[in-house]
Image: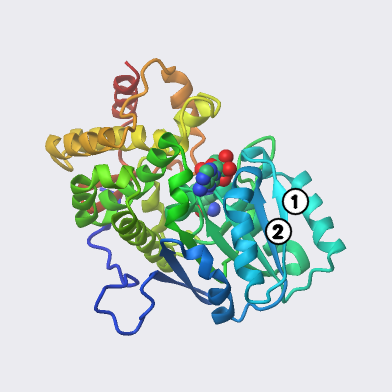
Amino acid sequence: MKSLRYVGLELRNRVTDGDLIMPDQDLAAQVNHSGGSYPVVAGWGLINSLGDRFMDLGLTRTAYIITDENVMNLYGRNVQRALQSRDIPAHCVIIPAGETSKSFELAQAIYSWLADLKAERGHTIISVGGGVAGDLGGFIAATYLRGMAWVQVPTSMAAMVDASIGGKVAINLPQAKNLVGSFYQPKGVFADVQSLSTLGKRELSEGWAEAIKHGFILDASLVDVFEEHEEALMDVEPEIATEVIRRSMAIKADVVSQDERETLGIRIMLNYGHTIGHALESSTEYGQFFHGEGVSVGMMGAASMAQEMGLHSRELVERQRHLLERFNLPTAAKGVNVDDILKGMSLDKKVQGGSKRWVMLEEVGRSVVRTDVPEELVEKTVRELVS
Ligand code: NAD
């Protein structure tokens, strides 16, 4: 049997209460990469102290904030003020909200803006917003002047627990998403958990899907926390929401620290639920399912197949379903065309040497990559998900 197994991957970068080496209360993790390391920090109301954080990192020169039209007034301006309060000059560029902003055209307009402002390599680009501001800002930081300092201030749930950590930066082409990009690491990731309180309920739920996924693949105790505190998490109660986000960030930070460029077969674990999830998103032309919702359905598909293959019990499948449903996430995709989903899956990036790599659970908190999932089982499972 061909498989890669992740048994109790050690969460080396987890910061615990008793940790004397990292006294920063808000520090979730430190990401290590080939060029050094950076802090991943989450706190309630953290934006107000961003000026101090920048001073600590030695980022005292001019900053260029890239944010979108929704986030600008909510948080972009506060980030600007926080920097200016420590005498760090900060300019802002406001991009349209949404995926279409990850384009060459917009990147080019921002390069011109930077050129007009005489941006220098020692200056800092700051992404303030969701994954779009993150990916685009990182792409610009990676390429303008062959690389500027870059800081992420994620404000959406998806950006906090996923997109802001790991240094993947990209823009889209008409042919497909994220086709042009690089691995480029930020100097720091600073999430103000309070900013989640202005997200819509559906956006919040889809973000929690990624964090719940982190628990199922690597941290059984995080799944317990989700089960115990569902209501408080959906209400973004400060203490518990901040703690869970830190834990989820630490899992992502740990995985990317061990497999910076996705070459070691470790980072793929984060794709639990993504094979069917991506296909669902693309087969419905990105109009029906948010990313996290597709992942939620995909997690159910993967769990159902794993159970049929004897990897784990039916009880685990039902436990996962129950938790996802409590977070208002879909666990099926009624009415979507089966052939479109199967076609979408055939274009999956996780195919290697002709075999599709499926991330599956062996138990809660323990995952495995399998390349021997029968096509008939995949087809049967997808049919069940849509009927
Ligand atoms: P997004 O950036 O478009 O944000 C979603 C919406 O939420 C936008 O309208 C935005 O204005 C709004 N918003 C953000 N924060 C808000 C807040 N606090 N209050 C109110 N509204 C707020 O999308 P996203 O879901 O954050 O991220 C998706 C993007 O991330 C995709 O482009 C995807 O490719 C990318 N991504 C990248 C990685 C990576 O590793 N680089 C990983 C996952 C996803």
Disc 2: residue Cβ within 8 A of ligand 1's nearest atom:
no
Quarter of the image with the C terminus is top left
The residue shown at (44%, 26%) is 342
Q: Position of residue 77 (x, y in %)?
A: 64, 57
The answer to whether residue 180 of the structure is visible from this angle is: no
Q: Is residue 318 above or below residue 220?
A: above
The answer to whether residue 128 of the structure is visible from this angle is: yes
Q: Amino acid at mark 2?
A: Ile
The residue shown at (39%, 70%) is 26
First in sequence: mark 2 or mark 1? 1
- Residue that lies at the very extreme toward the bottom in this rendered image: 21
Q: Is residue 3 above or below residue 339?
A: below
Q: Position of residue 51 (x, y in %)?
A: 58, 73
The residue shown at (52%, 30%) is 282
Q: Which residue position holds label 1?
A: 107
Find residue 140 and name its label.
Answer: 2
The quarter of the displayed image where residue 273 is located: top left
Q: Position of residue 90 (x, y in %)?
A: 71, 66
| Mark 2–mark 1 CB contact (< 8 Å) | yes
Q: Nearer the viewer, residue 321 or 271?
A: 321
> For numbered disc 1, what is the local secondary structure?
helix
Find residue 51 and name its label.
Answer: none
The quarter of the displayed image where residue 184 is located: bottom right
153 left or right, relative to 202: right
Q: Amino acid at mark 1?
A: Ala
